[in-house]
Image: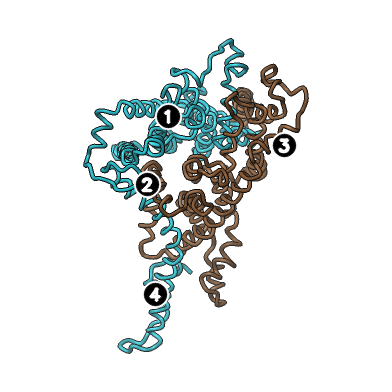
Chain colours: A brown, B cyan
């Protein structure tokens, strides 16, 4: 009886997945097609783009990347973006890590209030505070500086980072920390020698998500930087248009270079990306 | 060893009782140790990031509330003008009303199209074993692309000279016409966004009891009925929660519109985000922009209240 039942389900599933695979493949083409096209088109010449918009290039022009690198001033914008990303990720990991540890393990009086505060703050619309923040930053002389943008990014990412790290830390066994304490470690030593080595997947996930967010960020960057010396990589895009129109081969090559590091990291560590992004519920 | 999770009055202090009625040095030390351990150190760990967050978010937010009642230009003194800004917004400024209606259109698009895509994709993917990981990765991938790259891709695809529309003989610029621009941008954003929803729904679907599916099969349910009567009720809390979030996010949209049309053509895609940006940074009406930002906050609050009300009425969110 059981065997027949299992057989029934098995047959049913075999039958049904062809339908699923068919439509999923269509969705995959819809999702990946434009990305592949971006990659392919970044090798075409601007003239070929009009004649052959969707096919493979007749001639793979590697020099597009060199020209886009120069014209988009990627040398500078890449460097700036790396500084923004590294600065924000390290600040967020250190300070959100401390806060998450405190909330997960120490549970000080007021911890619940802190959690509610973070929850509410992560849903307050950015437009409520963006305009006054801009004028405050101007007064402090923080516009067009690395630390100005890094502080904003760190604060914006704090609620998500603290929540995610806290949920990781709560899952760790408490015995190891106690053992370290019995051996005479102080709080900071416990955190650095016990927690961080155990919870590194959580830290990695948060680092990846925060880093991705900063690398891709556009809105804050465009409002808080006006000096080309400080532009992040996302603003390089504007360099490819002039009065006569858009150079599509350079635009595509530039966009491809912008996204290549992200894609490589994503393919290597996609589980962590998916987990971190879906748990945080953040949107870019 | 639950001592570390417990309140200050935990087992550890009970384990080391002090002799009653004698204020020994040891007791004072112990009190100080406990104070440090349970109050001071945990808060020292919390203060840096909370301070920064308050500095970047809370203080400007409070300032924003204040400025929304002033005619501040962004420089110099702000004069208190009461509710004048709000009066102007709702009764005189047609561009605010138009922008708001575009945000509502954007919201209607985003509570329908990405949810349809995501429910379709996730219900297909939940049944698949072979290649499931590949599908999930591929469909999620657009979500990690920076908005500027997504916008570049779709600007190319919408190109009137050789883009996708030309394949079906349509040679008008989708982004250049008032009646299509907003939907074209929304579709590009949807392409980027729906994979994220799909993964959330997929995770929720994995939590549905398989017995329910077996029961549906025994009852002879087809695909659609199975989806409607088992899958959808099973993931309803996630779907409704995400609907709430998407409705809030619909009022914040900025990136895609700023990059693709900048509010044009002829203001046809000017949403609140763009309007606020222009008021604050181009027209030097920071007080008015702050008031507009306040209204977004109120709308977000209203949306949360509606969902909280529905939840109270027994919808399980």
Q: Which mark, residue B111?
A: 1
Q: Give the residue drawn at x 61%, y 23%.
A: A26
Is label 1 on the same chain as label 3? no
Q: Which mark, residue A132?
A: 2
Q: Is residue B158 left or right of residue B58?
A: right
x, y percentage for residue B273?
41, 35
* Chain identity of mark 3: A
In primary-sequence order, the first of circles 2 and 3 is 3
Residues under numbered marks 1 and 4 in contact, where contact means CB atoms less than 8 Å apart? no
Between residue A40 and residue B230, name the one nearer to us. A40
* Chain identity of mark 1: B
Is label 3 on the same chain as label 4? no
Q: CA distance from mark 2 to mark 3?
A: 40 Å
Between residue A241 and residue B139, name the one nearer to us. A241
* Chain identity of mark 2: A
Residues under numbered marks 1 and 3 in contact, where contact means CB atoms less than 8 Å apart? no
Q: CA distance from mark 2 to mark 1?
A: 31 Å
Q: Circle 1 sits in a helix, a strand or a loop, which is it? A: helix
Q: Which mark, residue A66?
A: 3
């Amino acid at each position: 009886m059981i065997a027949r039942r299992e057989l029934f389900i098995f047959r049913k599933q075999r039958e049904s997945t062809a339908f699923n695979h068919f439509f999923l493949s269509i969705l995959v083409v819809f999702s990946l097609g434009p990305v592949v096209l971006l990659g392919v088109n970044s090798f075409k010449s601007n003239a070929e783009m009009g004649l052959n918009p969707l096919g493979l290039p007749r001639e793979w022009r590697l020099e597009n990347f060199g020209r886009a690198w120069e014209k988009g001033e990627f040398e500078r914008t890449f460097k700036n973006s790396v500084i923004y990303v590294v600065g924000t990720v390290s600040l967020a990991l250190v300070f959100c890590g401390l806060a998450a540890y405190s909330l997960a393990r120490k549970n000080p009086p007021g911890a619940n209030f802190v959690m509610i505060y973070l929850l509410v703050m992560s849903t307050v619309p950015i437009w409520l505070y963006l305009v006054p923040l801009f004028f405050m930053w101007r007064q402090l002389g923080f516009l067009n500086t690395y630390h100005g943008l890094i502080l904003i990014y760190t604060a914006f990412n704090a609620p998500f980072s603290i929540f995610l790290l806290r949920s990781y830390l709560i899952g760790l066994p408490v015995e190891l920390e106690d053992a370290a304490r019995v051996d005479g470690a102080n709080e900071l030593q416990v955190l650095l020698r016990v927690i961080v080595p155990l919870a590194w997947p959580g830290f990695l996930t948060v680092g990846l998500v925060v880093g991705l967010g900063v690398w891709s960020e556009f809105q804050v960057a465009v409002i808080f930087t006006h000096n080309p010396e400080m532009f992040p990589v996302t603003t390089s895009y504007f360099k490819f248009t002039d009065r006569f129109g858009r150079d599509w081969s350079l635009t595509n090559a530039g966009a491809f270079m912008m996204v290549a590091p992200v894609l490589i990291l994503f393919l290597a560590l996609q589980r962590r990306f998916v987990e971190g992004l879906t748990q945080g519920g953040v949107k870019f | 060893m639950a001592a570390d999770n417990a309140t200050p009055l935990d087992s550890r202090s009970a384990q080391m009782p002090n002799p009653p009625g004698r204020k020994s040095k040891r007791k004072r030390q112990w009190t100080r140790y406990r104070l440090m351990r349970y109050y001071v150190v945990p808060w020292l760990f919390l203060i840096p990031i909370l301070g920064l967050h308050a500095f970047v978010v809370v203080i400007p937010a409070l300032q924003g509330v204040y400025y929304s009642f002033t005619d501040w230009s962004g420089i110099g003194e702000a004069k208190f003008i009461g509710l004048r800004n709000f009066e102007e917004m709702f009764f005189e400024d047609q561009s605010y009303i138009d922008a708001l209606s575009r945000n509502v259109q954007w919201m209607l698009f985003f509570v329908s199209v990405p949810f349809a895509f995501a429910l379709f994709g996730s219900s297909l993917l939940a049944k698949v074993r072979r290649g499931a990981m590949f599908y999930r990765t591929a469909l999620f991938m657009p979500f990690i692309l920076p908005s500027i790259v997504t916008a570049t891709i779709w600007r190319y695809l919408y190109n009137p000279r050789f883009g996708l529309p030309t394949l079906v003989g349509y040679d008008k610029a989708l982004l250049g016409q008032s009646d299509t621009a907003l939907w074209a941008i929304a579709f590009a954003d949807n392409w980027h966004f729906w994979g994220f929803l799909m993964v959330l729904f997929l995770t929720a679907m994995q939590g549905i009891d398989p017995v329910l599916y077996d029961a549906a099969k025994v009852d002879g349910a087809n695909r659609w009925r199975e989806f409607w009567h088992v899958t959808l009720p099973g993931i309803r809390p996630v779907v409704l929660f995400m609907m709430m979030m998407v409705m809030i996010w619909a009022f914040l949209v900025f990136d895609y519109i700023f990059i693709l049309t900048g509010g044009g053509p002829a203001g046809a895609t000017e949403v609140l985000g763009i309007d606020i940006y222009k008021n604050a940074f181009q027209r030097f009406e920071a007080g008015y922009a702050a008031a507009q930002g306040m209204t977004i906050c109120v709308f977000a609050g209203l949306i949360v209240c509606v969902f909280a009300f529905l939840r109270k009425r027994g919808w399980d969110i």
